Image (cartoon, rainbow, N blue to C red):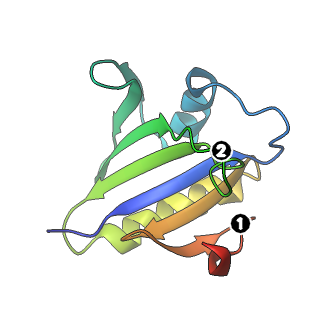
């Protein structure tokens, strides 16, 4: 089984968090993918890049870091490429300055723009 790669996302100004349908196009533009809305057992957006697949949805938890990072971008990449792909996507999103981003590898925080990983 491969490594779990998740990016927790929030806006750089979390006083008014955007809706999922508003953040999806912003994330898609940064990652260079088309995110398509899917419904079924849960509402999410799905996209495919050259070397990864992503699912974007909302985590309704009301505690930090989810309060300031309400969106979850699940990433799937080829076995052995998960860290490289996750780190690259983290950097792409963080470099815009528009997002708060946390990179989780196997549920451990390894990089974060705003939330201290040691508090994870």
Which residue appears at 81% of the width and 32% of the height? 16
Mark sitting earlier along the chain (2/1): 2
Residue 73 image point, x, y percent:
46, 47
Per the rendering, the mark at residue 62 is: 2
Considering every residue shown, the one lying at the far bottom of the view is: 118
Q: Give the vertical position of 23 relative to 6 (above or below).
A: above
Which residue appears at 50% of the width and 56% of the height? 7
Q: Give the vertical position of 104 relative to 18 (above or below).
A: below
Instruction: Classify residue 11 as left or right of residue 108.
Output: right
Which residue appears at 32% of the width and 68% of the height? 82
Q: Which residue is mark 1?
A: 113
Residue in the foreground of this view, choosing between 81 and 104: 104
Residue 117 image point, x, y percent:
63, 76
Crowding around mark 1 (Cα neighbors within 10 Å: few <14, some 14 to 19, many 20+) is some
Q: Is residue 87 visible?
A: no
Tell me the quarter of the picture where residue 22 sits.
top right
Q: Secondary structure at mark 2?
A: loop
């Amino acid at each position: 089984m491969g490594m779990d790669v998740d990016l927790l996302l929030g806006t750089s100004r979390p006083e008014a968090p955007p809706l999922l349908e508003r953040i999806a196009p912003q994330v898609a533009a940064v990652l260079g993918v088309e995110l398509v809305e899917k419904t079924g057992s849960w509402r999410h957006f799905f996209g495919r890049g050259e070397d990864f697949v992503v699912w974007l949805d909302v985590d309704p938890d009301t505690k930090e870091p989810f309060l300031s990072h309400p969106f979850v971008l699940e990433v799937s990449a080829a076995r052995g490429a998960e860290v490289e792909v996750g780190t690259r996507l983290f950097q792409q999103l963080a470099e815009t300055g528009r997002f708060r981003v946390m990179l989780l590898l196997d549920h451990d925080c390894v990089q974060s723009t705003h939330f201290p990983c040691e508090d994870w």
